[in-house]
Amino acid sequence: MYRYDEFDHAFVHQRVAQFRDQVARRLSGELSEDEFKPLRLMNGLYLQLHAYMLRVAIPYGTLSSRQMRCLAHIARRYDKGYGHITTRQNIQYNWIKLTEVPDLLADLAEVEMHAIQTSGNCIRNVTADHFAGAAADEIEDPRLWCEIIRQWSTLHPEFSFLPRKFKIAVSGAAKDRAALRVHDIGVQICRNDAGEIGFEVMVGGGQGRTPMIAKTIRKFLPKAELLSYLESILRVYNQLGRRDNMYKARIKILVHEMGADALAEMVEAEWRQVREGFVDLPEAEVARIERYFAPPPFDPAAGSDSGLDTARRADSEFDRWLEQNVDAHRQPGYAIATISLKSDGGVPGDIDAAQMEAVADLAERFSFDELRATHQQNLVLPHVRKGDLYELWQSLKAHGLAIANRGLISDIIACPGMDYCSLATARSIPVAQAISARFQDLARQKDIGDLRLNISGCINACGHHHVGHIGILGLEKKGVENYQITLGGRADGEAAIGAIVGPAFSAEDIVGAVETVVDTYLDLRETGEPFIDAYARLGREPFKERLYAAH
Amino acid sequence: MPLIKNGAIAEDAWQFPADDAPLPGQGPVAISLERWQREREVLQARRAPLGLLVKSDTQVEDFAADLAEFELIALDFPTFRDGRPYSAARLLRERHGYTGELRAVGDVSRDQFLFMHRCGFDAFQVSSGGALEGWLRAVSEISIWYQPTGDPRGALGTLRHRRAAAE
């Protein structure tokens, strides 16, 4: 993974000192809260219902053991002993004191981390396929380009006061695991007819109160020109994006209002001028960064390991975990293991300091010191030797982390909701907990099969409800929480926005309603037909009928 | 409101008459784009330096052809949240080769200085007091930049290139 050189180190330390000064000016009263707000937001610091919340960047979701141990230290030293993995592969802490933030950031800087641009109207921390560099279906590792984008976008002087936040995701695999089509810019590594590798660029996706699927504005962009092209998109957006209404300020609205073709033309026109004088990264610099993402020293003999089948036969619980949480690796003899952070009755994405340290140890022992955070709020050990999987699983089990539910109904994405967030209109966490308790039986979950259930506690959609196969949106009506169900959303290569199925349900009824949706599916599915395919075939009506039949 | 130029407090010789106010008899004036388009001949006949006060929703292309007429371009920030003048500044400096004074006016405070400076602004009409000391500090808070702009300070790609060449 990427390592800071002396310049990156110096930069992050300067940024910490700058923020220390800004905090001091806030504490002395020189800055009002209004003046301080944009400054703290540019450093991932929110003022929530009960305390400050700090969102720490995990660039493109990649972490080392040392970094994970530092995150555990921060949970203990500055928070209540835990953290929360977010839907943008970051981690946030919910109980932070303003006076301690500069020290916290200094601790992060020691392990080459920061909280820069994890909030605010700027280019946010770039996300990637969490199986990058490991996935069997990958054309090329996207993280080289993520790191290049990270550096380019860091304190970009022209794009730090955009109309609204701006999110970029990159994937190098055939299957879209990075939700590219619900990002402001989705970058897909692809091959053109001549066999050269470059990028397909999609623009204008997003969730929030006006969910939209991104449109492709360039089918093939040569690799060397990525930054000049991104700069052109951002410049057009910075100049033309709406600033009169914050709910209409994302680039998706610009794309919607002017049309993708017209926007593509403007970007191309800008690009023709930008690329003239643009100082692209020298090839030597690209090569320097690329070396950090070279594959780890895999053992070529690992492919001949045979212990795995024996262990599977001997231990059915291990077998279930293997089937559910382990994916094919590009390197023979290796596998990708997902660590589910969706324990029965737990808070989706929460991880305590002891678990962080345990996971750091396991990454060191079994995965070349590397970890990933996923936008589904889980963790991944990307490079595990197949012969080590049984031992890994036993260790995970000892820490309550061997939950075999990845991709099942209890693998819920949920925002913090009204338990923490000042924007929320309803609670999300208790709903997630109640659903995971209702569907506790793993055999039943397995029978239901692949199902994405996402919960947001308000219209801003941080819990990605629009792209859940089953989406739940928490609203408030006359002081009472109620929950709307959407069906048929998906965030993958065939991205779609879910359709509202009907009137909302009360907090008491929502879990039963979800169960009704699931039972309807089970009754109507054809052999081997996953939920999302059955929904595509059946449409909303049969679900609606069953849900509202009694009313 | 103090004016900071090239790292020091500067005297401001410029007048900014409102669009419906008469032009002052002499001295440099900065006017709106509308007034420039309307009273071009009158303004040129004054034989005094001319400047343009540009609203943030104006596109640089709308006055780029007339740049040679102006010694001052003042880009207005109606609020610090409005980031359009950063793009305008870079276009003026880097695309249109404007070399005159490029002044930030409006909601301009210390924590934006560094970004503005990097985009090519060289003068700042600041809205808060204690400005100079803060400005001097603000422009030196970060010395490493990841992206090239028209700013003479080299971006990191260049620094790394130089390091590699020296090795």
Image (spheres, coloured by chain):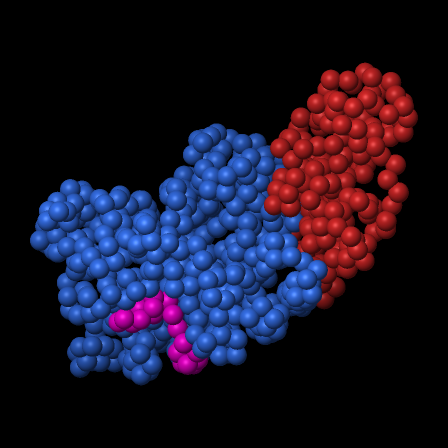
Chain colours: A blue, B red
In this picture, residue A527 sits left or right of residue B78: left
Quick check: can you spot residue A395? yes
Kindly give the residue lying farthest to the front in the view shown: A478
Q: Nearer the viewer, residue A432 or A69?
A: A432
Q: Is residue A545 above or below residue B100?
A: below
Quick check: can you spot residue A322? no
In this picture, residue A245 sits left or right of residue A490: right
Counting every numbered tag in the picture gives: 0
Q: List x then y, in percent, for residue B127.
A: 74, 47
| Residue at point 17%, 58% (across, down) | A512
Q: Is residue A126 above or below residue B28?
A: below
Q: List x then y, in percent, for residue A393.
A: 30, 78
| Residue at point 41%, 44% (across, down) | A205
Q: Is residue A359 magenta?
A: yes
| Residue at point 77%, 57% (across, down) | B134
| Residue at point 31%, 49% (across, down) | A477
In this picture, residue B153 sits left or right of residue A200: right
* The quadrant where residue B164 appears: bottom right
In this picture, residue A388 sits left or right of residue A96: left
Q: List x then y, in percent, for residue B3.
A: 82, 45
Q: List x then y, in percent, for residue A161.
A: 60, 47
* Residue numbers of the magenta segment: A341-361
Kindly give the residue lying farthest to the left in the view shown: A523
Q: Nearer the viewer, residue B9 or A124?
A: B9
Q: Nearer the viewer, residue A35 or A274?
A: A35
Q: Is residue A212 magenta?
A: no
Q: Nearer the viewer, residue A474 or B5?
A: A474
